[in-house]
Image: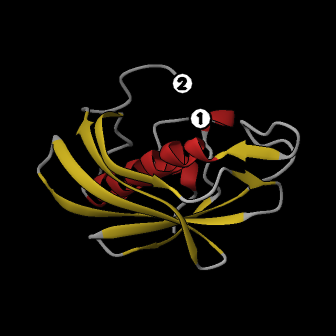
Amino acid sequence: MPPIADVLPHSGPMILLDEVVAFDGAGVRCRVTIRPGSMFVDHGRVPAIVALEYMAQAAAAHAGLEGQSRGEGPRVGYILGTRELSLEVDDFEVGDELVVEARKLEGDERLVRFRCIVTRQGERVASADLNVLQGHGKEHPE
């Protein structure tokens, strides 16, 4: 798998995911370990709502990997809506390793719906369906 920075339109500290661990065209699986210096850590914890951004970045990684197969670079995406957001925990702790999955349910080149799941030690801790409008490339600075 390519480095996560190669498939996301983000850079530097705004890249919240550590790596892509699997991609099969229909979905992507990424990993993030919460570290003391990770973005959004406060007193050793990250609010669970940040899982929404982890899911969005996994969806962006999916789009980036699809784009790479066509010789394109990462594309900016915009979350248009979220359905059935479920947060099973209040927060994540430093040391937690999260697996973030995004599966493409339907869509075309511009409008896509992803089903996303975040797990910790095999247990679901967050999930949502994301509706994403995909841009034509890196349209804004990070």
Task: Identify the element where label 1 is drawn.
Answer: loop
Instruction: Say which amino acid is labelled 1.
Output: Ser
Please determine whether, in this image, residue 125 is positioned above or below residue 4.
below
Spatial distance from mark 2 to mark 1, Cα to Cα?
6 Å
Q: Is residue 102 above or below residue 21?
A: above
- The image quadrant that residue 18 belongs to is bottom right
Q: Earlier in the sequence, mark 2 or mark 1?
A: 1
Q: Residue at x 62, y 34 (%)?
A: 14
Relative vertical location of residue 123 with respect to residue 113 in this rendering, above or below:
below
How dense is the environment of label 1, judged by Cα within 10 Å: few (below 14), some, or many (20 and up)? few
As drawn, the residue found furthest toward the bottom would be 122
Identity of the residue drawn at 42% across and 20% down? 140
Give the image location of residue 76, x and y in percent: 36, 34
Which residue lies under the disc numbered 2? Answer: 142
Name which residue lies at 79% across and 46% down: 45
Q: Which residue of the protein is positioned furthest toward the left in this rendering?
A: 108
The number of callouts visible is 2
Name which residue lies at 64% across and 64% down.
98
Q: Is residue 103 left or right of residue 10?
A: left
Q: On the image, numbered disc 1 is attached to which residue?
A: 11
Q: Nearer the viewer, residue 72 or 116?
A: 116
Q: Nearer the viewer, residue 82 or 4?
A: 82
Q: In the image, is 14 to the left or to the right of 83?
A: right
Q: Position of residue 127 (x, y in %)?
A: 43, 59
Residue 39 percent coordinates (x, y): 72, 37
| Residue type of the residue flagged with mark 2 | Glu
Q: Are marks 2 and 1 in contact (CB under 8 Å)?
A: yes
SS at badge 2: loop
The quarter in which the C terminus is drawn is top right
